[in-house]
Amino acid sequence: MTEKTEDYEAGNGMHHHESMPRLTATHTNAEGAPLSRQVTVTMSNEQYERLFFQPSAPRKGDLAKRFANPTLLGLICFLIPYTSTVLILCQFQGAVPPTSLIGIGADYYFLGTIGMNIAGIAEFILGNTLPFAVFVIYGSHWGSLAYNQDPIHNVTAAFEEYGGANGAAYNSSQGFHNITMCMVSFMIMIGTLRTNLPLTALFFGLVMLFAFIAAADLRIPSATGPEDLEYIEKLLQVAGGFGFIGLVAGWYLVIIEVCEAVAIPCPLPIFDLSTKVFPPKDKKTN
């Protein structure tokens, strides 16, 4: 019979788990009972970080061993619509933002919204607070973006008497939304300072992306000529450029996650920050 155990010591920052079954010796004690010993290995913060993007270990229990790791699902479901969005903002291959974004509405609905929220719920079950919050927040953001841009809902019709899609009433609402998402991304970026460098770079790109999209939204109502339209397009291109930083960092993390999922040796470093930025204090012993 084999059994696995798992525990975590906050003091030394090492995640203890049993990577092998219990080994039962062939020898017996004086009473004739078989002798057994338990082999335990340690997992460093960096090794744990490669799996969950969470600076602390899971709560006591074996849920992390019983269930699949949802981090890979959430990350990929975020990056698929995000990659297309960034390339559209950069206006590659004749893309025209924001009109071209309507064409990837299905990605927003199914991959971004459903996929990321499933991953977020799974992270909640495992006790990983930061990934849970990230997947649910940004998964829901994709859903709101898809709903707002879906021609079926015709959201801009309610603003016809206020200038429609080019009026201040509509674009101020979009600008305020992106300003709020910029603030949320900044707060989460602070939290990622205790995870790893690529994840911090991803959220830095998101902060700047939302900031420049908000600037473009708030500029639209005052546009009066070709120069203004060109300026708005430039703001969206800059947003896409910063978003590209997050795009590269995100797919870098996907490579690491895929390799870890199937135990392929991956030479790429995770650049773990959990022991470098506000490192945990040593556990006091009596």
Image (cartoon, rainbow, N blue to C red):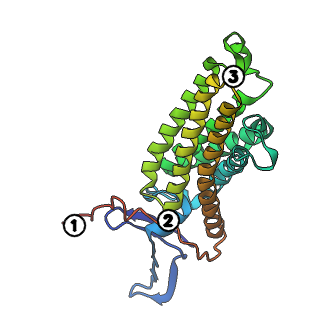
Expressed as whole percent of the image width and height from the top left, the position of residue 126 reads 52, 52
Query: For numbered disc 3, what is the local secondary structure?
Result: helix
Residue at 66%, 12% in the rendered image:
162
Residue identified by numbered label 1 = 285
| Secondary structure of residue under mark 1 | loop
Name the N-terminal-most of marks 3 and 1. Answer: 3
Is 38 above or below relative to 115? below
- Position of residue 165 relative to residue 286, above or below, is above
Query: What is the CA distance from the residue labelled 1 to the residue labelled 2?
Result: 25 Å
Kindly report which numbered mark, 2 or 3, lies closer to the viewer in this rendering.
3
- In the displayed structure image, the side of residue 286 where residue 223 appears, left or right: right
Q: Residues within 10 Å of mark 1 (few under 14, many from 20)?
A: few
**Quarter of image, res 112:** top right
Residue under circle 2? 48
| Label of residue 166 in the image | 3
Query: In this image, 282 relative to 46: left or right?
Result: left
Answer yes or no: is residue 78 visible. yes
Residue at screen point 71% across, 17% down: 164
Cα–Cα span, label 2 and label 3: 48 Å
Q: Amino acid at mark 1?
A: Thr
Image point (78%, 43%), residue name: 95
Amino acid type assigned to the residue bearing label 3 in the image? Asn
Q: Is residue 70 visible?
A: no
Q: Residue 255 in the image: state x and y as whole percent.
A: 65, 66
Q: In this image, 94 relative to 206: left or right?
A: right
Mark nearer the N terminus (1 vs 2)? 2
Query: Where residue 128 sits in the image (x, y, percent)?
Result: 49, 51
